[in-house]
Image (spheres, rainbow, N blue to C red):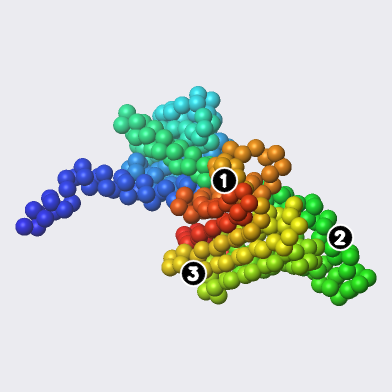
Amino acid sequence: MARTWRRTHLGTEADRATFRTLHQASLASPALREGLTEDSATRAAGHLRALLGTPALAVTDTVGCLAWDGAGSHHRQQVRTLLGATLERGRTRSFDRGDLGCTTTGCEVRTAVVSPLVVDDRIVGTLVAFAPYPTAGLARATDEVATWVSGQLALAELELSRTRLAEAEVRALRAQISPHFVYNSLGAIASFVRTDPDRARELLLEFADFTRYSFRRHGDYTTLAEELRSIERYLLLEQARFGDRLQVTLSIAPEVLGVAVPFLCVQPLVENAVRHGLEGVDRVGHVTITARDRGQDCVIEVEDDGAGEDPERVRRALAGTLSTDGAHDSVGLGNVDARLRSTYGDDYGLVVETAPGAGTKVVVRVPKFAAGVSA
């Protein structure tokens, strides 16, 4: 019965070998997905050696050895020579005893197979497998493992590119802080210097805190409470400028204040609402901001009763196909939408309800807890 159970549940020896191979690959993958560094190579080398079943293995960049795992570490100094010869050819090479001179009795490092690690048609390093004697099977296996490692490093490059893109998008949002807003805010503050110095001082401090938050350089995420505090400062400055023409209503559920959200994901929407609600009209404009607890999600709504927008124009802005012909608000919408989708998935993009003359309502839905998202 025991033999029958093992055959049924563990499979053949080939099945078990496949499982071991996949298991070792899964253990090496997290380190490789961080890119090719001394630390990541050191953490991955042991698992890569287990994949190939060799007595020793080295991982290099294009300059020298990053990590060595296994026996015969006294050969490490020879890796640079093997690396140079491989980079010169640009393909997998085998080296024999003549290339790996050794006087140590019983040393198993007698031959080597060196396969380039290639990312975007560019050699970034090599995988070096050492063995007592050369075999065609080891050469093929080393080449295949090097191809897999190259794929993991390519994914690391892609992740780095996505991170850089997200950082560039945040920088773009910072750069989009309207010079007119800065000029008008300082003008409004100046108007109170003689008539109400205390209020002028208070507004100046709010302006300083607002700009400090908008241009801060640490962290991709913040709490909803911090984002709302910055929005309140912005609205105080705009109310100093517009007076009673700007009416603001906030309805925030206390239980969502600690939710982590992407930095500057709500503030641009409020700035858009103020412009839509007031600029170009001679009446009172209303801006409403709500944040509610909805099960696993936090739902944030920013609504104005201003001029509204052509839905097709908004659709193109969210799709990233709208030209930037001074449409500061549309660029901001597309930026926020792209970052939300990148962080949480396509189910969490912006929802915009608008029509000419009917105002605009933007709905942001974020999960209260998401992997990798913390303020």
Label 3 crowd bin: few (<14), some (14–19), many (20+), radius 10 Å = some
Secondary structure beneath label 2: helix
Q: Amino acid at mark 2?
A: Gly
Which callout, 2 or 3, points at the residue further toward the start of the chain? 2
From the image, tell me which residue sits under label 1.
311
Front residue of 188/255: it is 188
Query: What secondary structure is marked by label 3?
Result: strand
Q: Which residue is mark 3?
A: 293
Q: Amino acid at mark 3?
A: Asp
In front: label 3 or label 1? 1
Q: Secondary structure at mark 1?
A: helix
Circle number at residue 200: none
Query: Marks 3 and 1, Cα distance to the nearest angstrom?
Result: 28 Å
Residue 203 visible here: yes
Q: Residues within 10 Å of mark 1 (few under 14, many from 20)?
A: some
Tell me which amino acid carries mark 1.
Pro
Q: How busy is the neighbourhood of tag 2: few (under 14 within 10 Å), some, or many (20 plus)?
A: few
- Which of the two discs, 1 and 2, sits closer to the camera? 1
Q: Give the left or right position of residue 197, taking residue 91 as reference.
A: right
Task: Depth check: give the residue in front, 147 or 310.
Answer: 310
Question: Visible in this render: residue 69?
Answer: no
The mark found on residue 187 in the picture is 2
Give coordinates of residue 117: x percent, y percent.
Answer: 48, 35
Q: Earlier in the sequence, mark 1 or mark 2?
A: 2
Corner quadrant of residue 286: bottom right
Is the N terminus in the top left, top right, bottom left or bottom right quadrant? bottom left
Work out which residue is located at the far right of the displayed protein and give it.
194
